[in-house]
Amino acid sequence: MEVLKIHNLEKRFGGKEVLCGLDLSVPEHSIFGFIGRNGAGKTTTMKAVLGLLKPDGGQIYVMNEKVRFGQTPTNRYIGYLPDVPEFYSYMTPLEYLHFCGKISGMDRSDTALRSKELLELVGLGQESCRIKGFSRGMKQRLGIAQALLNRPKLLICDEPTSALDPAGRKEILDILLAAKEQITILFSTHILSDVERICTEAAFLKEGRVAVQGTIAELKNMRRSDEFVIETAKKEAADGLVKMFGDLRADECNPLTLHGSEEHFFAVMRYAAENRIPVQRIERIEPTLESLFLEVTK
């Protein structure tokens, strides 16, 4: 089942066309990477999904219900985590979640049970201090708890790890992975290593359209690796290979980098074998989402 479906979405701001017939489908229980350069249309798309922005054309469906601008019953299926979540700083985490449950019409006993469960999930179960003393990472974790409070089907995360240190990023990613069993996640980010780590599928946006979409494995297989690393026992041997093969690049630490076909690589290896050049390491560099992203969006 597709939790989110977008067909031929269009949006203009004055004379600038931001979304140009965008098509997107997000399957249930996936963590879906939503990737693109600044200005590619990610935020515009998310605002349209939330019913906060009126498209100029196209349709959006959440759980097979059509999203309509200004009328947002489909938002009962959606949890939203902005890149910088805001809170009432004088409240404790538990007070804040109880407040959110009350204004969203949840039953009091259900709110209490769900709040305790979610605070444990995000690692804030023992926190009783006011939110004003929270770090950026703690606020992001509380933001996830708030977004999951009413058991949404779709969680939209707008660059949730962009301003966090490595430890904070790992915490947030681990929480999202744990939540995947119960929810579908649309994960917008510029950090492609995060996408590789937790996402099951992804789409690359370019100039208001989806350029490519697929599972992470499918996306990586779109670009065969043509880069090899060769390390010799002595730097003099590396210098000799560079003189013989001008397209080899060397760095100060000896390893050589070769861009080319497998035939070209085998030619270098034959030369090394015939001339008894001792090779310590040979490595084929695997394709990454970053290399595909740069290729697709350049």
Image (tube, helix red, strand yellow):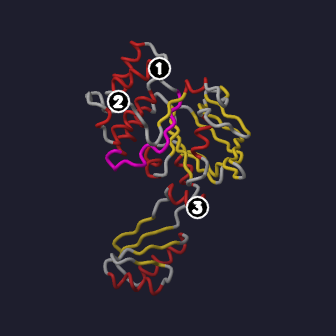
Q: Earlier in the sequence, mark 3 or mark 2?
A: 2
Question: Which quadrant would residue 224 be assigned to in this image?
Answer: bottom right
Q: Is residue 290 left or right of residue 238?
A: right
Nearest to the eye among marks 2 and 1: give it. Answer: 1
- Three-letter residue code for mark 3: Glu
- Secondary element at image label 2: helix
**Which numbered disc, 2 or 1, marks the residue that appears first in the sequence?**
1
Between the C-alphas of marks 3 and 2, the distance is 38 Å
Can you identify the residue that label 3 sits on?
295
Q: CA distance from mark 2 to mark 1?
A: 22 Å
Q: Is residue 168 something one can see in this rendering? A: yes
Which residue is pictured at 37% across the width and 47% down the height? 164
Query: x%, y% of residue 227?
Result: 49, 68
Residue that numbered label 2 is attached to: 121
Magenta-colored stretch includes residue 68: no
Task: Indicate the quadrant containing the C terminus: top left, top right, bottom left or bottom right.
Answer: bottom right
